[in-house]
Image: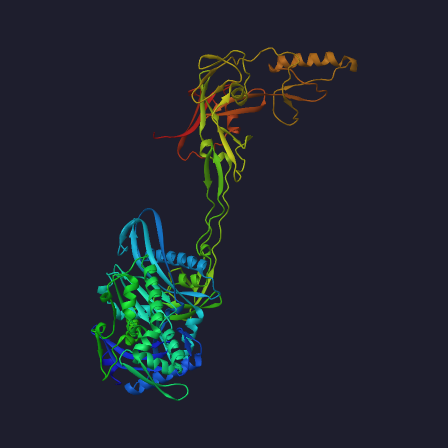
Amino acid sequence: MAGVRESQGQLVFGLDIGTRSIVGTVGYLNNGRFRVLAQYAKEHETRAMIDGQIHDIGKVGETISQVKRRLEEDLNVNLNDVCIAAAGRVLRTVTTSAEVSYENDKEITEEDILSLSTLGIEKAYEEFQISNDSEMKFYCVGYTPMRYYLNGYPMSNLEGHKAKTIGVDLIATFLPDDVVDGLYKAVELADLHVTNVTLEPIAAIQVAIPEKFRMLNMALVDVGAGTSDISITKDGTITAYGMIPVAGDSLTELIVQHCLVDFETAEHIKRSCGVQEVVEYQDIMGLPQMIPSKEILELVDASVTNMTKQVADCIKELNGDKAVSAVFVVGGGGMIPGYTDKLAEHLGIVKERVAIRGQEVMQSIEFDMKDARKDAMMVTPIGICLSYYEQSNNFIFVVFNKERVKLYDNGKLTVTDAAMQMQFPNEDLFPKRGKALLFSVNGKSRMMRGTPGEACVIMVNGDPADMYTQIHNGDRITVTPSTAGEPASLELGKLPELSEYLHIYVNGQKIDLPKTAKVNGISQNEFYQIQEGDDIEITNSYTIREVAVFLDVPLGEVIRVNDMPAQADTKVYENFTVSWDMSEETEADEDEEWNYITDDEAEYEEAVTEEPEQDVSDEESWEEETKEKAKEETGVGTVKETVGRDVKFTRSMMVIVNHLPITLQGKANYVFVDVFDYIDFDLSASRGRGIVTQINGRQAEYMESLKDGDVIDIYWKELNK
């Protein structure tokens, strides 16, 4: 047999570790048909397993060793690798849906589909955790996409299509850690290495329901010793898994009590009653006994009725509260007479559509040994072998941020799978935006998003990696969490509404008035930092008085708005026309005061005062003379009292420069070049261009005197234009 692996294909060793017995099968795949070279079943000598759960790892390990040695002797080969299946007793499933949307049509890639499935698994795990009322730690051991959606429509394959939304319905399966650990330790005691782990319901369906039948709405019931595992198929896929903790052992225990025998003898009686009219046995007193099979069937009738009722209810629940079209039954527990008829009755379907599947489903299986067993007991063991070719799954161990983690290897594990298994926060994998700023403008809600942070840093075995990097047994993964960006911040003046101007016409000239805002009812300047929940109202009007203050000109008594009489408090809006008399008085009243500043070093037009040679009592008359002298020399208003110092007389003037009002201050008279002290204009930045300077639409002279309200334009112009 040494040449079997090379000439006929790789040998696969499968173990069905059941509650009552361990069945070993060795074979290989050849041209699409599986050839069984050897099979051997051995029952546990003690109740080392109960309801599919290993209770005595050492005893189970010893039984596995015995099965392994027997097969090695039959084949004259060394068996080192093995495929196993986890029982459905502790299998938990969650069916859920997930959807991803894009801003624009996007061509869907394999990574997009993986991200969609990952999102679905995360959602399934969250839903599972809500219903998980035990302290056991569960692992996601696989998932099956049932159907995909492209823009809301069912689609068998998304890759290559363009879509704005993609979705998936999937079924995720979970197993507790101790179940998997128990199986691994028992197998390791027999010096075997696990190369593939599947689920018993999946293994059974590999053989019992071929792919071509899965378009039908069917159920598979694997009735073992401790559990009844259930699978549902529809539309070409497995749509649900389930389990009830009642199976063949519950019937055996009734026989134990009724016949006063040990468990092994009771099993013999149960199996014989279907093929013999009278069963002979020896009770615990050592006395020979005989019992009619009819009596045994009457004894277990109520239990079979209860068992099939629970199975039927579970099938309906998994199938959307309705019966399936047909049921296949495998496993030794379902071979008790009357089982299939009662199950059909509870489902409400004809009894011919519930059948035990054994030799008839093994048409593609070849047996290379005499007296090969081909009944329903062999469906799951052979299915375990076939699952090796379908999935080649196994558990691997990796180190994630210095913690050892076990993963169910489906052949395409990535960093994402390890992160999910360790319950690494999803928000720490992707860049986080800083806190958003929520406020309202003119009654409408508005949000300013924070800045994005840095993405997480991923290393696999010291090398840079990403979320989609595949991982293998023994890999060391380090994930440094992503960071959050800065919280959103916004100055009031940066609102788009305040970047616009209110345009009105004053005495025939167009004036650009900046819009203002109130925050929570209080006027704020453009540098105000908007706070969470602020209520902002944009002001789209000015009163006539506010316009005059903005222009820094006196407000006349006769005011007209849109050629209609108006008052100082009249509001003006976009494109309103306003007029009033702005002419200045040439003779100021003596009590009118003009601004001045004291500056011994500045250049200015000065009015020099000399201290009079009279007594202090004559100071008042001296002041009057000084005022008159100042008026004559400067042509401007009066001066406050200043004795014995040089005084600079000043006034303010408003001009419009490049559509913006500018207030000139600090001098008595102003010329054109003074404007450059108030605007941001770099005279050295010509770069081959010429400067354009205009006053009231005509060419300006640099030393030309300015007057209130002059409209000035200054800009660069290309010389060749």
In which image quadrant can residue 281 be found? bottom left
196 relative to 115, above or below: below
In which image quadrant can residue 396 be found? bottom left
261 relative to 625, above or below: below
Nearer the observer, 652 or 198? 198
Nearer the observer, 300 or 474? 300
Percent position of residue 335, x then y: 29, 74
Q: Is residue 462 visible?
A: no
How many callouts does the rendering have?
A: 0
Nearer the observer, 563 or 359? 359
Nearer the observer, 216 or 159? 216
Q: The N terminus lies in which quarter of the figure?
A: bottom left
Q: Is residue 71 visible?
A: yes
Horizontal arrangement in the rendering, residue 583 relative to residue 220 (left or right): right
Percent position of residue 40, x then y: 31, 82
Scheme of colours in the image: rainbow
Percent position of residue 687, x then y: 41, 35
Q: What residue is rendered at 44% in x and 12% in y?
A: 563
Percent position of residue 451, x then y: 47, 46
688 relative to 11, above or below: above
333 relative to 143, above or below: below
Q: The C terminus lies in which quarter of the figure?
A: top left
